[in-house]
Amino acid sequence: MTVRAMLYQGIACAEMKNFPEANTTVEKLRQLIETALGKKDKRYYLFLKGYIALKQEHISQAIDLFEMAYNLLPDQMFQYDEHAFFLEPLVESWRKRNDLEKAKMYAEKISALSTGRYQWGDIYAKNFFYLGKIYQKKGQNKDAIHNFEQFISLWEDTEIFGREKEEATRQLALLKKTATQ
């Protein structure tokens, strides 16, 4: 089994709250990386371990692991750029910790990506939703409106992110109503 297959298997197990299987997968991934692959590939093990921690609500541990994994990424490149994939759960983790400045910092890194937009366009687009929520919580309504509008415009003709689109539409209407009063 390849590293990516094991990574996605572990993520699927964590999403289903099957933590014993997720931990078995992360351990197999660690062994594979330590015996057959390069040191930089440790980022996949750290990421999966962080993902499991996030799903178990161990936010501090998740943040530490995600940041270590992110720091092992190579520079952006057109093919196989994984920055958005590695940054998205960092945004989520910092939001769960209610540290909006850190969440915003990592979300803005996603927005600034160049090549990662091609492979991870869904993450890039959904990032506008997260930025809208962050700015709204910070009381920066103009920036929140801009980001919610960006998110809605990118997904207006699809059924993808239906729940998020509904929430963004509601929040946008509320923000615009408040701005005109």
Image (cartoon, rainbow, N blue to C red):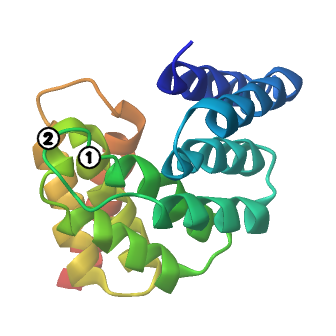
Secondary element at image label 1: loop
| Residue bearing the label numbered 2 | 118
Q: Nearer the viewer, residue 40 or 73?
A: 40
Asked if disc 2 and disc 1 are in contact, CB closer than 8 Å, the reply is yes
Residue 115 in the image: state x and y as whole percent. Answer: 14, 51
Residue 38 in the image: state x and y as whole percent. Answer: 52, 44
User: Local crowd at mark 2 within 10 Å, few (<14), some, or many (≥20)?
Assistant: some
- Considering every residue shown, the one lying at the far right of the view is 20
Q: Which residue: 40% across, 58% down?
A: 73
Label annotation for residue 81: 1
Label annotation for residue 113: none
Q: Is residue 23 visible?
A: yes
Residue 120 in the image: state x and y as whole percent. Answer: 26, 40
Q: Quadrant of the C terminus?
A: bottom left
Up the image or down, 127 lies above or below 26; here it is below
Distance from label 2 to label 1 (Cα)?
9 Å
Secondary element at image label 2: helix
